[in-house]
Image: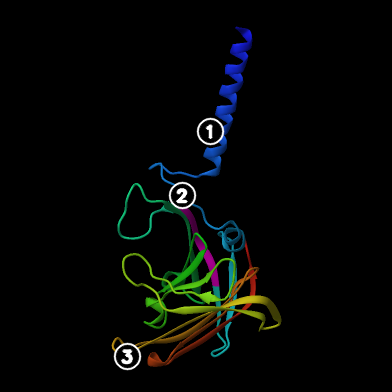
Amino acid sequence: MKKTYTLITASLISITFFCLLVTSACKRDKYNTPVIQINAGMMADFGYKTGTYWIYRDSVSGEIDSAWVSDANVYTDQPGCLLSNQMPRFQEMAMTVTVSHIDPVVAEKWYFHMEDSTFTISLSNNRDSVESRLALTLFHYPLAKGDASYFAGCVGGGSRGFTDIIPEVSVGNQVYSNAARSTHTLNDSIGNYYYNDLFYVNENAGIVKLVFNHPHSSVHRVLELQRCKIVK
C-alpha cells in the first residue's frame, strides 16, 4: 500500500511539473488563446524606454532637433478587423518619440511600433502634410534585404518599401556598420501624394539618418544623428 501511494505521489508530481513546463512555454491570455511574443532579439535591440534620446542635425537647414522617448508601453492586442476569441493575439510595444527644437506641445511625433518581427513608424504633426500621413515598416527582424511593405488594420495604411543592408553608413564623425536602409516611394498623381523617403537604422543607435523627399510639397529634410543615449 505504501509503495502504491509513493508511485501515485510521484506521478502527480511529474504531471504537475509537466503542466507547469507547458504553461511556461506557451503564453496565453485571458481568452485562453496563444499570445505571439515580440521577437526577443528585436525587443533587446529596439525596445526603447523613457530616458532614450537622439540629437539630429538637418544637413539642409543646419537646424538641430532633439528626439526623445516620451512614452513606452507593452500590451497584448489582436490586430485586424475580424476579432475573435479563438484567434491568437500579439504582444506589442508602442513607443512615442517627441521631436522638437522649440515648444514640445506642438512638437512632431514619431510613433514606433513592434509586433512579432516587424518594426514600423508613423508620423504626425509634421511640417509637411505628406509626412503626417505616412505609416511605414522600417524593417523586419533580423535585419535583412527584403520587402518592407506594411498594411495596417482593415485597409492599406502603408507604402511599398524595400530594405537593403548597407555595410557602412557615415553620419557626421561616426561610421555605423550594417545599417538597414528602408526605402519608401510612392507616386500618386490622383491624390497628389508623392514621396521618396529613406531611413537608415543601426542596431546600436536606432535611426541614424532620415531623408524626407516630397517633391509635390517641395519638402527636403535630411536628419543626421549627432549623438544619442539608448535606454532599453
Name the residue that disc number 2 marks.
35
Q: Amino acid at mark 1?
A: Cys
Residue 216 occupies which quadrant of the picture? bottom left
Q: Is residue 192 visible?
A: yes
Q: Cα distance, mark 3 to mark 2?
A: 41 Å
| Mark 1 nearby-residue class (10 Å; few <14, some 14–19, many ≥20) | few
Q: Earlier in the sequence, mark 1 or mark 3?
A: 1
Q: Cα distance, mark 2 to mark 1?
A: 18 Å
Q: Secondary structure at mark 3?
A: loop
Relative to residue 55, is residue 197 depicted above or below? below
Relative to residue 19, is residue 84 depicted above or below? below
Image x and y of residue 64, in percent: 57, 81
State the residue at coordinates (52%, 38%).
23
Q: Is residue 188 magenta?
A: no
State the residue at coordinates (41%, 80%).
131
Q: Which residues are magenta?
A: 67-75
Q: Is residue 116 left or right of residue 133?
A: right
Q: Nearer the viewer, mark 3 or mark 2?
A: 2
Picture disc at residue 189: 3
Image x and y of residue 198, in percent: 52, 82
Residues marked 1 and 3 touching at CB (< 8 Å): no
Picture disc at residue 79: none
